[in-house]
Each structure stands twice: as structure tokens, then as C-alpha cells.
Amino acid sequence: MAETQAQRSHVDIGTFIEIEDYTRSQEDGCLVITARGTARFAIHAFNQQHNQILFASVNALPRWPDCHVDKQSEPLVERLQSMFERYPELQQMHRETEFSNLAWLCQRWLELLPLPTGEKQQLMANSSCVATRDYLLSMMQDPH
């Protein structure tokens, strides 16, 4: 999420991942990695080695509690389903879909939307999905 040293000082939340697959691109020889996020963590300190490898001290954060989708949140479901229909490769990224779970929906929207790093970090740092739901619904009602 942070590409520069200045951005790193503002990144407090990250995601543990599992590498599911990797291959070398036939087009340009780049390594292509398929990864799945497994949990959030809070970053306490960054260290950069002389070879540009980053290390950080982190603590795992609890998962957002599952939350049932209420009537107010239905636009999040409808629009994500529409995105999955339009771009089937997005849906293929998820083994199972949980359209009735607001926490799952909000996490998918955070993955997809090109939000500024600071805004995404604030939303990810919350202990539940409620602030993210409110933010997403306000974006849908008031296009930015």
C-alpha cells in the first residue's frame, strides 16, 4: 500500500497473506503471484535493510465481526454482484461469496476501490465494518 518512505510513515495497517500460486509471465518474464489475504495486522515500526527489503514489527488484529446485511446496506450487495457479473475474473478470486455478510462485502469493496492510502488505512483500522459501510454508502449516494 505504501510505495515511498513518506507513505510508509502513514501506513499503520497491513494484511497477512498466503501465496496460493506463482508462475512466470510468458509475455515479459515477470513473476506473477496469486495471494489470499488471511488477517489484518497493526504495524508498529518499519525497518529497511540495505538491500531494500522491509521488515516490520506487527500485531495481529481481530477479524471484523460478521454482520448481517440490512435494508440500508443492500446497494453494496447489488453493486458488487453487478461488478462480479461484469468482470467474472473478480468473482473467481473468491472461493466462496458471502453476500449476506456486511463485513465480507466491505472488505471486498476496500480491495476494489482506488481509495487514497490514508482513507483506506482509517477504514481498515476500525474494529468493525460499520464506518466502512457508511463511507461506501455515502460514496454511492454522492459520487466523488
Image: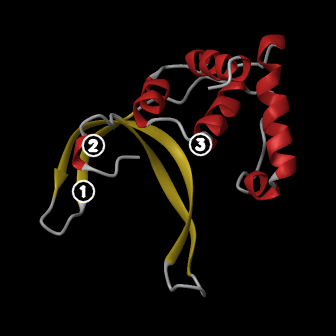
Q: Residue furthest left?
A: 50
Q: CA distance from mark 1 to mark 2?
A: 10 Å
Dot label at residue 111: 3
Between discs 2 and 3, the one toward the N terminus: 2
Please state which amino acid type lies under the numbered disc 3: Glu
* Residue in view at x 23 percent, y 53 percent: 55
Measuring from the top left, give residue 5's x and y in whole percent: 22, 48
Measuring from the top left, give residue 144's x and y in whole percent: 61, 26
Dot label at residue 54: 1
- Which quadrant holds residue 43? top left
* Residue in view at x 69 percent, y 19 percent: 137
The residue that label 2 is drawn on is 8
The answer to whether residue 7 shows anywhere in this view is yes
Measuring from the top left, give residue 37's x and y in whole percent: 54, 49
Q: CA distance from mark 3 to mark 1?
A: 22 Å
Asked whether the beta carbons under mark 1 and mark 2 sit within 8 Å of each other, the answer is yes
* Residue in view at x 78 percent, y 51 percent: 91
Please state which amino acid type lies under the numbered disc 1: Leu
Q: Nearer the viewer, residue 55 or 116?
A: 116
